Image: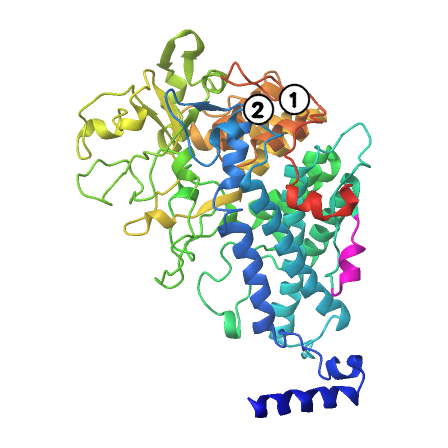
């Protein structure tokens, strides 16, 4: 005990000979963790994982879009998980835990990107002192900086669409909405000095970042040294991913000339090089290997594995089980009823939503379901999209088992015992080959979407022939026996919108199409919802309480 007292007295004596500031001063400040392009990659990989495969990703953007858009139908007697009813009934004032996760995750991505971009800025564009003529600088470092800009833009684009009123095409966008951070915070003062950005300012940064990305990203990756692994580029942004997203941002803002210029560039590149092209409607949805990239997919959410290896068991489209036909245990592209577990098609017992009857009527795929006529039309039966990426299930019938033929044609799961009418499901998830169906990839931006958006822009500028041409490209792929149905006399907003529903339902962009074209967002099948007209000023979710309570800028 005496020795302990002596030790304490010695420490006190030492402190008495120096000031507190001197004693606790950090003599060797912490060095950056990034010293090479290989280590610089760590933050970038983490950003992509956060955007795609945390609980802010994994299909939640697609899920929220589908449920709020008025194109989903809540199954009778079903209480869907993942706050499905809150989204379906557009309960924007609800404080949802998922929204807190989305907020934190995207600001975490923004911080990572800001840290990395600060390193680039402070290092005068070459912080690792690379030979600027080397492959490492040209094909790795330059690309990485551009990808950090892209990831920051995508994070802000996600946040501004969820937590702020939509961009007003014909009004002011000067309301302060969310924190706007262009550099990392390195001190308490930095945090206190962070300001809220206006809607306009946030969109300005998104556009600036995407312009930088498209100008500095390559058409396609050149793999060299540490990243020379087949499939490395899957799920990442190249020049055409950034260009496509920039066009989508402009489209949502109502900057139609700018949007068309970006879409023109993407389509011209696709058509002149053959890098991207339309194939069978199911092809973007049935690949499970990272290196097996569908020709139509411009940007994929990548759950695929590299070189046959798979370790991250949560990297899959989790929400697909609640908004789609198949469960995650499905294996194989074709619908197939086999008796064994994890064999063939496994119908999702979690599913709570089909396609709205009002939408099926507009798509021309059911005769009059709102009035009890659920007849599938000949037009639907002939359309390869209906055949390949949507699926009709008949009303519930007791006693059907997996392995029975009716298992893939008729509702048989106990959770759907109250379903008394036929429903059409989205069938775009979990279609990869055995044993990796769970990890099937999913397209986030694909070429058909770009053609349809440009079709609307052409129609809106009175280029009716151009609009018809773009529509026919998408239509003909799905209807080769009945081509070129669109002409200058029948192309209009409704025709393009209905084609968009046939092509893109469940892929996360329906609300953006509606807002970008300034159409009224439909109520759908629910009598509790109302249609929503522009400028959609109440269409946003509440900012999490933690942020509001801790950030005095909201007071």
Report the residue at 75% width, 60% height from top.
Answer: 183
**Are discs 2 and 1 less than 8 Å apart at CB?**
yes
Residue 491, visible in the rendered structure: no
Magenta region: which residues?
Answer: 186-195
On the question of residue 372 being in view, the answer is yes
Between the residue at mark 2 and the residue at mark 1, the CA separation in whole angstroms equals: 10 Å
Q: Which mark is residue 163?
A: none
> Magenta segment: does it hold 192?
yes
For label 1, the residue is 519
Apparent side of residue 181 relative to residue 520 in the rendered image (left or right): right
SS label for mark 1: loop
Q: Is residue 300 left or right of residue 244?
A: left
Q: Residue at x 38, y 61 (%)?
A: 311
Residue 433 location in percent, x, y?
30, 49
**Residue matched to label 2:** 497
Looking at the image, residue 163 sits to the left or right of residue 121; the answer is left
Which of the 4 image quarters holds residue 388? top left
Which of the two residues, 243 or 70, is positioned nearer the viewer here? 70
Asked whether 526 or 251 is in front, the reply is 526
Q: Residues within 10 Å of mark 2 (few under 14, many from 20)?
A: many
- Residue 517 belongs to magenta span: no
User: Which quarter of the rendering shows the N terminus?
Assistant: bottom right
């Amino acid at each position: 005990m005496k020795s302990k007292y002596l030790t304490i007295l010695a420490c006190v004596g030492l402190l008495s000979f120096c000031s507190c500031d001197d004693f606790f001063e950090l003599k060797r400040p912490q060095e950056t963790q990034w010293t090479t392009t290989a280590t610089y990659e760590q933050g970038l990989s983490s950003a992509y994982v956060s955007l795609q495969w945390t609980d802010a990703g994994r299909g939640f953007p697609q899920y929220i879009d589908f449920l709020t858009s008025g194109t989903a139908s809540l199954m009778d007697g079903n209480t869907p998980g993942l706050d499905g009813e809150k989204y379906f009934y557009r309960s924007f004032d609800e404080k949802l835990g998922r929204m807190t996760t989305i907020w934190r995750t995207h600001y975490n991505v923004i911080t990572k990107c800001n840290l990395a971009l600060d390193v680039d800025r402070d290092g005068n564009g070459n912080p690792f002192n690379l030979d600027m003529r080397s492959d490492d600088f040209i094909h790795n470092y330059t690309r990485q900086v551009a990808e950090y800009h892209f990831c920051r833009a995508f994070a802000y684009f996600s946040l501004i669409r969820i937590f702020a009123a939509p961009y007003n095409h014909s009004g002011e966008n000067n309301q302060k909405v969310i924190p706007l951070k262009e550099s990392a915070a390195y001190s308490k003062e930095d945090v206190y000095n962070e300001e809220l950005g206006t809607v306009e300012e946030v969109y300005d940064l998104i556009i600036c970042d995407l312009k930088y990305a498209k100008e500095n990203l390559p058409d396609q990756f050149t793999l060299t040294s540490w990243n020379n692994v087949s499939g490395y580029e899957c799920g990442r942004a190249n020049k055409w991913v950034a260009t496509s997203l920039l066009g989508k941002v402009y489209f949502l803002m109502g900057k139609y000339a700018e949007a068309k210029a970006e879409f023109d560039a993407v389509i011209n590149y696709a058509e002149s090089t053959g890098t991207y092209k339309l194939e069978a409607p199911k092809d973007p949805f049935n690949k499970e290997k990272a290196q097996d990239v569908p020709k139509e997919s411009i940007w994929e959410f990548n759950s695929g594995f590299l070189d046959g290896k798979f370790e991250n068991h949560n990297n899959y489209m989790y929400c697909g089980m609640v908004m789609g036909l198949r469960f995650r245990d499905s294996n194989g592209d074709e619908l197939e009823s086999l008796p064994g577990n994890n064999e063939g098609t496994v119908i999702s017992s979690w599913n709570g939503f089909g396609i709205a009857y009002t939408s099926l009527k507009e798509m021309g795929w059911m005769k009059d379901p709102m009035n009890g006529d659920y007849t599938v039309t000949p037009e639907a039966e002939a359309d390869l999209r209906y055949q390949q990426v949507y699926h009709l299930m008949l009303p519930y019938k007791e006693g059907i088992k997996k392995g029975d033929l009716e298992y893939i044609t008729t509702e048989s799961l106990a959770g759907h015992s109250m379903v008394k009418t036929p429903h059409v499901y989205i069938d775009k998830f979990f279609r990869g080959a055995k044993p990796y169906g769970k990890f099937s990839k999913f397209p986030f931006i694909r070429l058909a979407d770009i053609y349809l958006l440009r079709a609307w822009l052409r129609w809106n500028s009175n280029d009716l022939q151009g609009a018809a041409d773009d529509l026919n490209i998408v239509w003909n792929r799905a209807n080769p026996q009945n081509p070129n149905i669109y002409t200058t006399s029948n192309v209009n907003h409704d025709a393009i919108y209905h084609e968009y529903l046939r092509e893109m339902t469940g892929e996360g962009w329906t609300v953006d199409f509606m807002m970008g074209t300034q159409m009224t967002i439909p109520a759908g099948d629910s009598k509790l919802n109302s249609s929503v007209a522009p400028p959609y000023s109440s269409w946003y979710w509440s900012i999490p309480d933690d942020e509001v309570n801790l950030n005095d800028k909201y007071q």
